[in-house]
Amino acid sequence: MKQNKWLHMVAFALVIVGGVNWLLVGLFGWDVGALFGGQGAMVSRVIYVLVGLSAVELALCHKKDCKACEAKPMM
């Protein structure tokens, strides 16, 4: 489905942002959400929700979108 390509690309980008955020939290204890007023700020909460929804979308649609999972095993 080509109309979902943009959704997949946005979701992928947001999941990367979320992953980098967790890396920064783990390594340095620094949350990217702090740039937007901390975890309680509405902007940060919206970003967190979008990243979470992106992860759910990728998890649900992974099998049909992933070329590596579509590949047939070599005999």
Image (cartoon, helix red, strand yellow):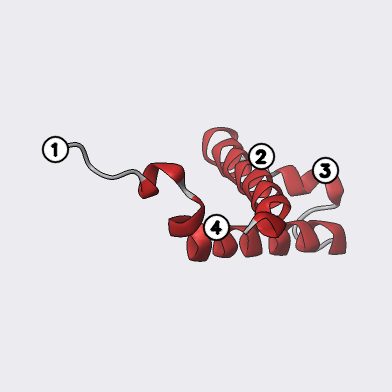
Q: Nearer the viewer, mark 3 or mark 4?
A: 4
- Using residue 35 as the reference point, say whether residue 13 is left or right of it: left
The residue that disc 2 covers is 30
Label number found at residue 44: none
Q: Nearer the viewer, mark 2 or mark 1?
A: 1
Helix, strand or loop under label 2: loop
Mark 3: few/some/many CA within 10 Å (<14, 14-19, 20+) = few
Label number found at residue 75: 1
Q: Are marks 3 and 4 in contact (CB under 8 Å)?
A: no
Residue 15, position as x, y percentages in the image: 61, 48
Callout 1, which amino acid?
Answer: Met
Residue 69, position as x, y percentages in the image: 37, 48
Helix, strand or loop under label 1: loop
What distance separates the C-alpha of mark 3 from that of mark 4? 26 Å
Mark 1: few/some/many CA within 10 Å (<14, 14-19, 20+) = few
Residue drawn 73% across the image and 51% down it = 6
Q: Nearer the viewer, mark 4 or mark 1?
A: 1
Residue 23, position as x, y percentages in the image: 55, 38
* Residue lying furthest left: 75
Q: Are marks 2 and 3 in contact (CB under 8 Å)?
A: no
Please state which of residues 41 and 69 is positioned toward the viewer in this rendering.
Answer: 69
The residue that disc 4 covers is 58
User: Is 35 located above or below residue 28 in the figure?
Assistant: below
